[in-house]
Image (spheres, rainbow, N blue to C red):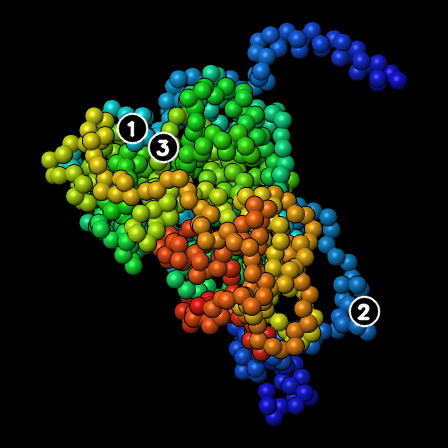
Amino acid sequence: MSNFLKGHHLALFLTPILLASSFVNADTLNLGRTPTPAEVAGWDIDVRPDGLGLPVGQGSVSDGEYLYDEKCSSCHGIFGEGEKRWPKLAGGNGTLADDRPDKTVGSYWPYASTVYDYVYRAMPFGEAQSLTHDETYQVVAYILNMSDVIDDEFVLSNETIGSVKMPNQNGFMLPDPRPDGQLASAPCMQNCEVPTKIIGRARIIDVTPDKE
Amino acid sequence: MAGFNRTDELGLLKRLHSDGEQLTGSDRRGFLKNAMAMMGGAAGVALAPSVLASNNLPPNVPSWTRSLGTGVVTHPYGMPSKYEADVVRRTVPWLTADPISSISFSPIHKLKGIITPNGLVFERYHAGVPTINVEEHRLIIHGLVDRPLILTMDDLRRFPSVSEIKFLECPANGGMEWRGPQMEGLQFTHGMLSCCEWTGVRLSTLLAEVGVQPEGKWILAEGADGAAMSRSIPLEKAMDDTIIVYAQNGEPLRPEQGYPIRMLNPGWEGNTSIKWLRRLEIGDKPWYQREETSKYTDLMPDGRAREFTWVQECNSVITSPCPENPFKGKGWYEIEGLAWTGKGKVKAVDISFDGGVTWRPTQLKGLVLSKALTRFSIMHNWQGEPLLLQSRAIDETGYVQPTLSQLRQSRGVNSIYHKNSIHTWQVTESGSVFNVQLS
């Protein structure tokens, strides 16, 4: 009983405070605080194809070649060919409909802005967000040049990157067409006409890691 | 082993056991493995040497009954039995250039029910697991909002929370098998799959707090890891069921799963569920990040690619038997498996013993939850007949899990992601199970 009264009194006491705070902002819990512009700017690194988020800066293909050799080529190869299983950056144009398509920055990526965004946010591997904006423009210029998307004299900048048209810009389809049409039938339960001949066995390929 | 009687066999096994005792660790395992191979597999499966030499079987009183065990907090966090040391995540070294940017697979062949223990949830990193100090981590929400916000993790825990059981699957699960079967093991064919109870704050709650402006249609989610992993999420999904998660199966999120916070987009490809979440920016258009252009787009035979294919469509697989769980002799077995769909609940799962010519319904067991793993099972009295085992799931939208031929017909073999076709296990007369494809 006394506990109940305590709680009752507390509720009466708190009510005016809650009402007062609700005048501040009726719809929110007012948790957290407003970030400073500097806090947002330090983390706001994304770049969109329409240029939103592009930092001011520029870089030439030749400066990019120097930087690329130093910071990128050990994994991606001198010519963007990709060492071991690291991603290949150049080549493969016109192969996307082949039996063995070669998806590279040059042959597959639809937007130059994505290259800028990704290089700045995640590269060099293990040293993310260490390049200056000018250095990022330089490296991206060289990568695009390796795939013949821009010529040797091109200077990539926040002003010019929007003019770069990637070969596969129109190679993507929206919206998601699934479920694929022929899949939406009622399931067969008996005498289903399906192929039952074994045509492939994982055992033959023998690439499964040892269970030990 | 022909011409080898039971007494000889037991004697040899006992001698092998005592010889093997002199060796330790992998030497011993190797010795025993070779010895088993020498004797022929069947005897070895039925009678392991350690059991033969045991005084712990009835009618003897086991050693663990005659002595005291270890005390409380011997392992403050807790450890599985040492006899279950093989229930671990595994990777496929040749898949990726470096384990820092790679994937591991959940041992779903060893798991029961629908919950994946936290230490066994599959891993996918692009720059390793960051070690984040929770006190120094922040979530910034900004862009087309009325009230931009920066939250500490304590702030986040003061919002109303939800706890929901949802599966998480990499859209590349099974992607190694578009051209043909490659992996001889369920862990590798389907192990980029886990299911947890996730606790956190609905993203819609946070969006109400910041006030999304009318032009705001997309959200960029970004991680604090060395890849600053990022994806564009449409506002409809964010307002529907996206959760900003801070706990997993009851405990704080594991570092591998995004500690201290991650996004969870139920039913969608795992890559969209950004881990180590640090920033949400609201915009009017998608960002076309690397992970939604170069990766996680599905290349079709005509050279064009589908993009923003977020939903993980209905899928299922038999978890027992499987290559790691063969039949050990004739008799009754519970055949069971997992089914799941990113579009809601699993409605039914059928099973075929003859490669898909004849189907019969199975029973759904335990919890049947939306966008969660669902168990199915059927009892079978196996008499040594060869089988082509398949499961076929149907979800509440009426979508029927397709055959591999159907998928190949519409998508070719180069789309990498979203291979959710009916899977075939070949069971041979000996009870061994192999990964095969039919045509």
**Nearer-the-camera pick, A158 or B423:** B423
**At which x and y percent is residue A196?**
49, 70
- Cα separation between marks 3 and 2: 67 Å
Q: Are the numbered discs 1 and 3 placed on the same chain, yes or no?
A: no
Question: Tag 3, which secondary structure?
Answer: loop
Q: Which mark is residue A50?
A: 1
Mark 2, other Cα within 10 Å: few <14 / some 14–19 / many ≥20: few
Q: Quadrant of residue A136?
A: top left
Mark 1 neighbour class, 10 Å CA radius: few under 14, some 14 to 19, many 20 or more: few
Q: Chain of mark 1?
A: A
Which residue is the site of mark 3?
Answer: B287
Task: Please identify the quarter of the rendering in which residue A67 is found.
Answer: top left
Whether pointer 1 and pointer 3 mark residues with C-beta atoms closer than 8 Å, the reply is no
Name which of mark 3 and mark 2 comes first in the sequence: 2
Which quarter shows the N terminus of chain B? bottom right
Q: Horizontally, is A38 left or right of A14 in the view?
A: left
Question: Residue B48, can we see it?
Answer: no
Amino acid tagged 2 = Val
Looking at the rendered structure, the kind of residue marked 3 is Trp
Look at mark 2 in the image and give the residue it sits on: B61
Q: Is A98 placed above or below B279 here? A: below
Q: Secondary structure at mark 1?
A: loop
